[in-house]
Image: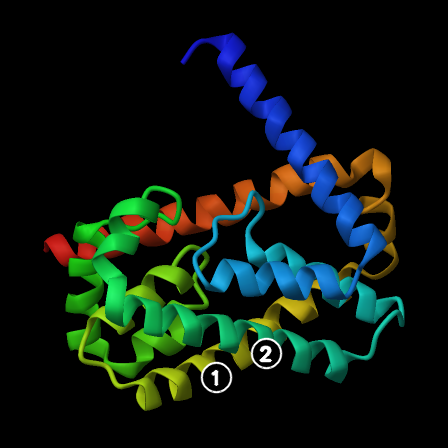
Amino acid sequence: MDKTKIADAGNKAYDISQQVIGLIGTHPISIPVVLLFLEEIAIPLPIPGEFFIVYDGYLVSQNAISYFKIFAMLLVSMTLGASILYFLSVRWGNEIVIKLGKYIHLNQQKLFHLEKMFNQHGRWLIIFGRIIPGFRIPITIFSGMSAITFKDFITNVLISNVLLISFYLYLGKIFGLKGQQILQQKYSGLFLLLLPVTIGVLYYLTSHKLRKKNNL
C-alpha cells in the first residue's frame, strides 16, 4: 500500500470518526447503546465499543445521566446483542467466521486456541476473556459453535458485562472536567484515533502472550 492509499484510509477513518462524534453529540445516550448492541451482534464498527462506555462514564461525571440508568441500558444492550450472536453462531457459526472473520479478528486458528483455553479454564474464559479488548465477539461466536449451553453462556456473559461496564464507566468518570476538553471538536478526532490504537496495542500484546503460551 503506497503513501497515497494510506493517507486516503487515514482521512476516511478520521471522517467516519467525526461522523460518529456528531451522532453521539446529537444523541449522547441512545447512540452509544445502539452501537454497542450492533458490535455485539458482530457488525464491525470503526471505533471499539469500549470507547462508548468510557464516553457514557464521562456523561455520568457531568450529571448528564444517572449511573444506574446508563449501566442498566448498557447491560441490557450488550447482553441482548451477545444472546442474538450466540444463536446465530449455533446455526451459522462457520459462515460468520468466513465472511466476517477478518473484520472481527477471528479465524479457525483463533477458534482452536479459544477451545483449548476453554478446556483449561472453563467459564472463566467467558467471564474474563470478554473483558479483553478484541475477544468479546470471538468468544461469543465460539460459544455458539461449541457445546456450551445458552444458560451457562448467558450467566457468565452477565457477570462479564457487569465487570466490563463497571470498569469502563469508571474510566470515563475519572476524566471528569478534563474529558470535556478532550471531547471538544478540536481534540475529538485525536482522542478517537488514540483510544483505538491503545486498545489495539493491548489486544496485540494479550493475543501474542496467549499464542506464545499455547505453543509451549
Label at residue 75: 2
Q: Quadrant of residue 166?
A: bottom right
Q: Which residue was labeled with disc 1?
A: 158
User: What residue sits 61% from the left and 58% below the top?
Assistant: 35
* View extreme (front): residue: 91
Callout 2 secondary element: helix
For the residues bearing labels 1 and 2, Cβ distance under 8 angstroms: yes
Q: Amino acid at mark 2?
A: Leu
Callout 1 secondary element: helix
Q: Is residue 177 visible?
A: yes
Q: Amino acid at mark 1?
A: Leu
Q: Quadrant of residue 186?
A: top right
Q: Nearer the viewer, residue 142 or 174?
A: 142
Residue 117: x and y in percent read 20, 69
Of mark 1 and mark 2, the one earlier in the sequence is: 2
Q: Is residue 53 visible?
A: no
User: What residue sits 47% from the left and 53% below the top?
Assistant: 43
User: How many numbered discs sit on the rendered protein?
Assistant: 2
Quarter of the image where the N terminus is located: top left
168 vs 203: above or below: below
81 vs 71: above or below: above
- Marks 1 and 2, how far apart at CA: 8 Å
Residue 123: x and y in percent read 29, 82
